Amino acid sequence: MPGTGKTQFITEASRILRETQKVLVTSQIHQAVDNVFERLPISKMSLESMWTTLSELDTFPEFPKKARKFSPENRYLDRIPENLSFDDLVEEYSSALRKIGNEYIETFSKPNFLAGSTALKTITYPLSNQKFNYTFIDESHNLCLSTALLVLSRSERAVLTGDPWQIPPVYTTASPLKRDRNLESLTCFMKWLKKR
């Protein structure tokens, strides 16, 4: 239920655990993760925390300014002046992307860190090969089971929060009778299957 302190609990628990553990905070939507990172106090430790949002910074211009401080992409890409020549711009972006990659490598080689990302983004680089001691999944009722399992398979312990009274993800499939008709639209493939 809203207002019960789930986000505050995740913020405090992940902040404390980050001192000695590898911690992941994730959710189906970026806003839930943003809310956790916005509540983290600014400190050297929190600025070393990782926030993997390269695509999210471009996709969501309303990305909260307070949460942006955790993004290595933000720290490097936002410093690039807009009035550069094309060649200089390419050089600046190349340099920034190398620094971002190095920061990921450096941070994820440490024995402890805090990473935050949407659930689907956690199964892509740079988080795809990471193992976590703790994973916090906020708004877990919004995750489909397959995505949740992909996230949880890389964690020793997990805390799932969510509101059981909210609507879970809804998926629809064609009924078995309609499914055959839908497959018939793939006539070449169907003909090949029938010959086998």
Image (cartoon, grey):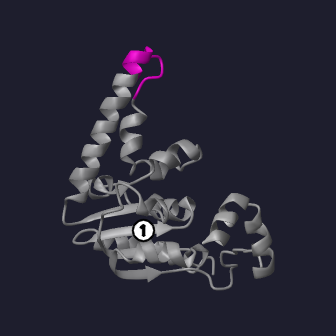
Kindly give the residue lying farthest to the front in the view shown: 195
Task: From this view, report whether residue 64 is shown above or below residue 182.
Answer: above
Task: From this view, report whether residue 166 is shown above or below residue 104.
Answer: below
User: Magenta residues?
Assistant: 80-89
> Which residue does the image show at 54% across and 59% down from the upper left?
30
Give residue 79's quadrant in the image. Answer: top left
Residue at the disc numbered 1: 25
Secondary structure predominantly adopted by residues drawn in magenta: loop
> At which x and y percent is residue 34?
50, 59
Task: From this view, report whether residue 90 is shown above or below residue 163.
Answer: above
Q: Nearer the viewer, residue 158 or 17?
A: 158
Kindly give the residue lying farthest to the bottom in the view shown: 164
Give residue 101's quadrant in the image. Answer: top left
Q: Is residue 147 left or right of residue 89?
A: right
- Locate the N terminus by quadrant: bottom right
* Residue 186 seen from this side: no
Q: Nearer the viewer, residue 131 or 110?
A: 131
Q: Is residue 92 left or right of residue 103?
A: right
* Residue 14 seen from this side: yes
Crowd class of label 1 (few under 14; some 14 to 19; many from 20; radius 10 Å):
many
> At which x and y percent is residue 134?
33, 76
**Is 39 colored magenta in this rendering?**
no
Q: Amino acid at mark 1?
A: Val
- Locate the C terminus by quadrant: bottom right
> At which x and y percent is residue 194?
67, 71
> Which residue does the image show at 54% across and 79% down from the upper left?
145
Q: Is residue 53 left or right of residue 107?
A: right
Q: Secondary structure at mark 1?
A: strand
> Which residue does the image show at 57% across and 45% down from the upper left?
59
